[in-house]
Each structure stands twice: as structure tokens, then as C-alpha cells.
Amino acid sequence: MKKHFKTIVKAALISVYVIFLAGSIVRMTGSGMGCPDWPKCFGYYIPPSDEAELLWQPDKLYNKGMMIIQNESLLVAEKNFTSSDTFKKDHWQTYTKHDYAVFNVYHTWTEYINRLASVISGLIFLLLIYTSLKFRKENKILVYLSFVAFLGMLFEAWLGKTVIDSVLKPSTITIHMVVGLLIIGLLLKLLHLLSTKEERLIRYNKTFHYLLLISVAFSIIQIAMGTQVRQFVDEQVKLFGFDNKQMSLYNPSIVFYIHRSFTIAIVLVNLLIFYKNETLKLNFRLPKYIVGLIIVEALTGILMYYSDFPIGTQAIHLVCGAILFGMQFYLVLQNKYATN
């Protein structure tokens, strides 16, 4: 298993990015409350595909925790029972964590697939921990980083529950996003420790290192602001409906304008990084890919603002931002341990 550890780290990293993608699709489609409870969905391990399944029915077996929608409220079965010919309130209790009681099959299954992606990722992280233990005598840092990354995933799972219980509270979503970036950073550190040979070809530069640190900080700030802008868009969609996307950024807050203008600073810093790498012949490969990603980020941002959020642009924008952070962070690690 030891020889496959690097592959498992890569699989864990990819799984986190898949979660980012799935999460962005959930937000893009307004499916965040598609499953109003956690970890089940309407009290089911496999969610319903028709609203009729969530309406009370006579002579039906209900298991403890299953939900129904009754008078625009969620009711939860208090125990296992078979319903009689008439509805009896004493078998049910009102769901009190929030008052959201809407079923939309597309939103429900979009959110459910997002959760499945998280479950698969969790299994990969368990394999990561198990395999890392093979290194406990020769390289304990691999074990420590693997366990911290796994604990981060557990914290993310708890945050996911909190996001649902708070009915998509913006600050919680922002923390959820930032913790995801921290997990990516831990996995990239693991990957770097297993890939030291590539540092033989690159050269360390102090100024270049400071520029890289600035670029990472800028990306984190930009992504955090982006989650706030995304929340504003969600609220506009709820207010005006999905058919009126031209209203998604109607009268936005100051955060949107800072987020948009801050892109200029990000572009300039990363262009300077690319320039330094080329002129000083530092031999890093990532700067050119970073510039390419920033171009995609800028283009999707422009399309969202001026073309009323074309399909897929929001997901591409968010995932590219997360990948951009990962590349910048890995570049910091490469430069830090490069030869003088």
C-alpha cells in the first residue's frame, strides 16, 4: 500500500475538487435546501423522486425519522408505525430546526448527488489515513497531515449540516469554503513531500516567494468575497425567480464591486510572477497555467455579469478559483524548498 500512497493523496485531492464542483452546481441551481435535513434526505437514505411520497398516506409503514409535508410544514415520524385510515398527529413531531418545507425533485437529487460525492471523498480519506500509518516509523509528518486533513473533512461535514440547519446562512457558507481550501493545502503539502525530485530543476528567489504569498492571500480573500456575492445572487433569484436572471446582480452590495475590482490586483500580481519566472529563469512550470486559469476566471466573471449567467459559468468560475489557489499554494511549496 505504501507505494500507492501518492496516488491516494491525488485521489483525495481530486475528490475535494469534485465536491467543490458539486457544491457549485447545487448553488447554481438553487438546490441547497433540496434536502432539508442532514445526513438523510427527508428522512430517507435514498430520497423520494415524487412529491406524493412525502404526503401522508394511509396503511403505509413509516420508519422513525421519515418526513412528510403537512400543511406546508415538515413532520417527522417519532417511531416506527403503520398509518391507519386517518391521520393521527400523535405519531408525528414538527421539524423545528427550520421552517423550510418545499419539495423539488431536481433540487433534491442535485443536493443528494452532492452528498454522495462527499461520502465517496470520505471513504478515500479513510484509505488515506490507513495508508499513511505505514509511514509512522519513517515519516510521521505524513501521518499527522493525513489525520488533520481527515479531521478537516469531518469538520466540513458538520459545517454542511450547519449550513442546512441555518437555511444557507452566508457566513457559514464562507467558512465552509475556506475550510475546503485549507484541506486542499494540507493535501498539496502531502503531495509535495512525496515529490521532492522536481525541486532539483528549479531555483529559489526571495522576491518571487513574497509575490507567491501575496497571490495566495489575494486568492483566499477573493474566494471569500465571491461566496458573499454568490449569496446575494441566490437571494435575488429567490426574489425574482430563475427566469429573471438579468436581475441577479441588480443593485448589488459594495462587496460585489470590491470583488470585481480586486481582480485587477490579482491579475497584476500573477503576471508579475510569470514575468519574474521567465526573466530570472527560475524554471517553474505552474505560472503559465496560473495565468491561463486567471483568464478563464476573468472571462466567466464577465459573462456572468454581462450575459446574465450563462449555464455552467458559475460552476467553472468557482472551481477554477479553487484550482488557482491550489496551484499558487503548491508553487509556494516548490519555491520554499528549491535550491538557491
Image: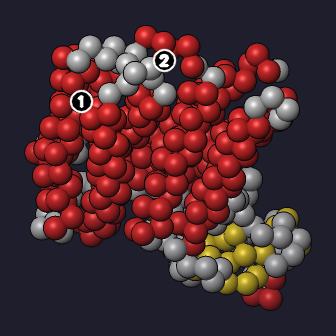
Decide if residue 273 is on the left or right side of residue 195. Answer: left
**Mark 2 residue type:** Glu
- Mark closer to the observer (1, 2): 2
Q: Nearer the viewer, residue 311 or 273?
A: 273
Give me the disc on residue 326.
none
Neighbours of disc 2 within 10 Å: few (<14), some (14-19), many (20+): some
Name of the residue lying farthest toward the top? 201
The residue wearing badge 2 is: 199
Q: Secondary structure at mark 1?
A: helix
Furthest toward the bottom, the residue is 90
Q: Taking 40 as reference, is 270 left or right?
A: left
Quadrant assignment for the N terminus:
top right
Q: Is residue 60 above or below residue 91?
A: above
* Residue occupied by mark 1: 273
Residue 178, compared with residue 7, is above or below; it is below
Residue 284: x and y, percent? 35, 18
> Looking at numbered disc 1 in the image, what kind of residue is underneath it?
Ile
Image position, residue 320 (x, y; %): 35, 35
The vertical placement of 244 against 64, above or below, is above
At 53% across and 41% down in the image, what residue appears? 184
| Label 1 crowd (10 A; few <14 / some 14-19 / many >=20) | many
